[in-house]
Image (cartoon, rainbow, N blue to C red):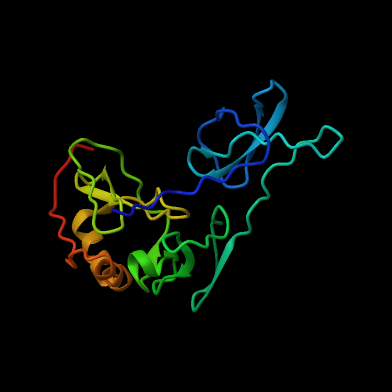
Amino acid sequence: MITLFMTVFACGGDEAPGVATGCSIGETVACTCADGSPGLQSCVAPPEGFSTCGCASDGEGLFVPLPEPEPMVCQLPSGEVECPPYRGDDVTEAGAKHCCTATDACGSQSDFIFGEQCIPRDGERGVPSTECPDEFPNFLDLFGCCRSDGQCGLSVDHVSNWDIGCLERSEMAALLNEGSRERDVLSLVFFLPVEDAVFESIDCTP
């Protein structure tokens, strides 16, 4: 099975483990390089996704963090809406691209996962739970999560730029089926069954 993994963006130079948790896009914090010298790391994937330690010098001992990404803008009938920035431009088929929903919200879109549908961003994250199984439809890994309403959900937020949160299982199935054209074609190429996603509702303990 072909699986999709999040691209990790890192500054140049030696790598060292992250030193902070909880961050916002563009935030930089001090870190220590593998050789013990000081460096900086940048927030690339909230809430805990810092880059590896940036240790590249400009010749004067100054360390250069990742550039702060620009915010997205939706020009909607209700007016201009500024959306949170993504980690950076994503050129993969599965990584999310900016879109604006029909209900005047900031959204994420990928032809490969959800077709032309624009999914609202900044959804409830949910928490990992053994009560909520992962699912693996053709070419996708969906991670189980428990929502605050006591319903199991599924997340694609491990794939680059997605931030739509933990979608209830049957809702995720409906969205995947609506946008399955590209994955169905690829399934036929690899002689895999073309089937609708069916994820039954499951209760969990928030």
**Residue 66 relative to residue 169: left or right:** right
- Residue 97 left/right relative to 68: left
Q: Position of residue 86 (x, y in %)?
A: 54, 56
The image quarter containing residue 101 is bottom left
Viewer-closest of 14 and 205: 14
Q: Is 106 above or below relative to 147?
A: below
Tell me if residue 172 comes above or below residue 63 in the rendering. below
Q: Check the image and report above or below for 95 versus 135.
A: below
Q: Quadrant of the C terminus?
A: top left
Q: Nearer the viewer, residue 153 or 161?
A: 161
Residue 33 sits in which quadrant?
A: top right
| Residue furthest bottom as drawn | 77
Q: Which image quadrant for residue 28?
A: top right
* In the image, residue 186 above or below residue 13: below
The residue at 80%/35% (across/down) is 62
Q: Residue 189, percent across and down?
A: 28, 69
Residue 97, how many percent across, how many down?
48, 64
Seen as rendered, the residue at the extreme top is: 36
Q: In this rendered view, identify the residue nearer to me: 83 or 133.
A: 133
Residue that appears at 63% across and 55% down: 69
Residue at 46% over, 70% down: 100
Q: Give the camera-side residue of 37 and 105.
A: 37
Give x and y (percent) for residue 6.
Answer: 44, 49
Q: How many numbered discs sit on the rendered protein?
A: 0
